[in-house]
Image: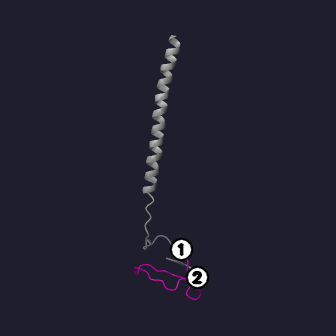
């Protein structure tokens, strides 16, 4: 009889631990999904940030007709003779 009572007590403790772990896992999944959804704020950026250390290739859906740089320190080059959809900054 004593062995059975000890076994049932251990079993109840295990059940409590498992119940707690299940709740913890559900809470973690719920919290991480909300955090992931909040991190998906998509902003349309109309500015390309560049520096003088690297060359950037830009691809556009339509052929380039005109290129304007925001500063005289930078140059945007593209093929003016043959309309293409990519250029170098």
Q: Is residue 4 left or right of residue 39?
A: right
Q: Secondary structure at mark 2?
A: loop
Name the spot of residue 65 as percent of width and height, x first.
Answer: 52, 86
Q: Which of the two marks, 2 or 1, is nearer to us in this view?
A: 2
Identify the residue shown where x is 49% and y is 21%.
Answer: 10
- Residue at the disc numbered 1: 57
Name the spot of residue 59 as percent of width and height, x first.
Answer: 55, 75
Q: Residue furthest bottom?
A: 81
Cα separation, mark 2 vs mark 1, equals 13 Å
Magenta stretch secondary structure, dominant: loop
Specify whether residue 50 is painted magenta: no
Q: Are marks 2 and 1 in contact (CB under 8 Å)?
A: no
Q: Is residue 79 left or right of residue 70?
A: right
- Residue at the disc numbered 2: 84
Q: For this rendering, which residue is in front, 28 or 64?
A: 28
Name the spot of residue 7 as percent of width and height, x first.
Answer: 52, 18
| Residue 68 against residue 31 in the figure, above or below | below
Q: Residues within 10 Å of mark 2 (few under 14, many from 20)?
A: some
Specify start and end residues of the magenta stretch as a single range.
60-84
Q: Residues within 10 Å of mark 1 (few under 14, many from 20)?
A: few
Name the spot of residue 53 as percent of width and height, x first.
Answer: 47, 70
Q: Residue furthest right?
A: 82
Identify the residue shown where x is 43% and y is 61%.
Answer: 41
Q: Which image quadrant is residue 85 in?
A: bottom right
| Residue 67 against residue 52 in the figure, above or below | below
Identify the residue shown where x is 58% and y is 85%.
Answer: 83
| Residue 1 against residue 71 in the figure, above or below | above
Q: For this rendering, which residue is in front, 79 or 1?
A: 1
Q: How many marks?
A: 2
Q: Residue furthest top?
A: 1
Q: Secondary structure at mark 1?
A: strand
């Amino acid at each position: 009889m004593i062995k059975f009572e000890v076994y049932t007590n251990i079993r109840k403790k295990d059940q409590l631990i498992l119940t707690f772990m299940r709740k913890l896992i559900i809470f973690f999944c719920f919290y991480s999904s909300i955090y992931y959804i909040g991190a998906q704020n998509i902003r349309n950026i109309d500015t390309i940030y560049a520096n003088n250390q690297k060359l950037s290739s830009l691809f556009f859906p339509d052929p380039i007709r005109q290129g304007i740089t925001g500063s005289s320190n930078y140059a945007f080059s593209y093929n003016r003779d043959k309309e293409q959809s990519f250029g170098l900054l």
